[in-house]
Amino acid sequence: MTKLSVNINKVATIRNARGGNTPNVRQFAIDCERFGAQGITVHPRPDERHIRYADVYDIKPIITTEFNIEGNPKGVSKSKPYGFIDLVKEIRPTQVTLVPDAEGVLTSNAGWDTVNNQQYLCDVVKEFKACGIRVSIFIDANPQMIEMAAKTGTDRVELYTEAFAREYHAILSSSPKLGEVDAKRTEECVRPFVEAACVARDCGLGLNAGHDLSLENLAYFHQQIPWCDEVSIGHALISDALYLGIEETIHRYLDCLK
């Protein structure tokens, strides 16, 4: 079964745009779980432009499913006298997902180079696992990088799926008839991810996936890689909720994972 973890960063973005506490990030996390989400994801960045370090502390006590904290272990909060590693070790979420965000990037845009960062990742993974935290490494669909990720001792890898989502959308957009899909082209666009997922499985790694997964592409992605443990979805899901409401949206995403 593939679990749905809802990334609530965009809820915090809306709140921060106006100030105050509307929408209430903590209550939104509670509601996501109530409506069927099997996990909550946050990605605090040093500039705290969406999820703040304080939010992570507020959210932790109310999580009844799984709590996943994403981020760059090198990140240092601008509002707190400590960094990402200190935050995660204190909160002790179910899972920490290591993402190599450069400071100032709009969104995550690359996976780890697990060759050149091998020793660093080994050290960070060891530190988190000593605290009983499951570790996942955000990674491109590159067999070599996945094989080297396995050598760090990580529990899982998370496939960076933007390229799949972009190509899948282009295929649908170019179809002569609405809803008509070019099976050969869609198979080609997902193939690198299926191959990467097989490498991860052969290496004994758990598998997550995320970035630009949506109601448009999630069901197809899941059909091709049904052994994926978890998908983490934020931007598309929160955008859909503006039209459908959060309860209906979560139900539709869960249907894609059946």
Image: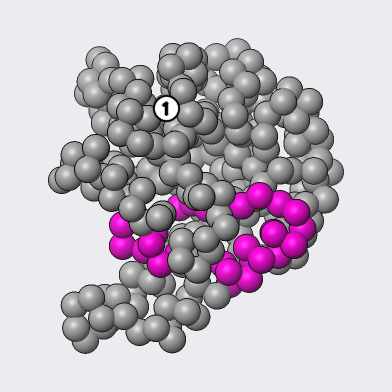
| Disc 1: which residue | 51
Tell me which residue sits at (49%, 18%) in the image: 60
Quadrant where the image shows the C terminus: bottom left
Q: Is residue 245 visible?
A: yes
Classify residue 218 by image quadrant. Answer: bottom left
For the magenta stretch, what is the residue range? 192-221
Indicate whether 208 appears above or below 42: below
Q: Position of residue 227 (x, y in %)?
A: 57, 58
Q: Is 27 displayed left or right of 55 in the figure?
A: left
Tell me which residue sits at (52%, 29%) in the image: 67
Comparing 123 with 154, the one in front is 154
- Mark count: 1
Q: Is 118 displayed left or right of 65 in the figure?
A: right
Judged from this view, the residue extending furthest toward the left is: 243
Q: Is 59 displayed left or right of 22 in the figure?
A: right
Indicate whether 124 appears above or below 208: above
Tell me which residue sits at (60%, 33%) in the image: 95
Q: Around disc 1, counting alpha carbons within 10 Å, would you say few (fewer than 14), some (14 to 19), or many (20 or more)? A: many
Tell me which residue sits at (29%, 75%) in the image: 172
Three-letter code for the amino acid on which mark 1 is drawn: Ile
| Magenta-colored stretch includes residue 163 | no
Q: Position of residue 228 (x, y in %)?
A: 55, 55
Q: Position of residue 54 (x, y in %)?
A: 46, 15
| Magenta-colored stretch includes residue 216 | yes
Q: Is residue 239 visible?
A: no
Indicate whether 238 appears above or below 212: above
Q: Position of residue 124 (x, y in %)?
A: 75, 34
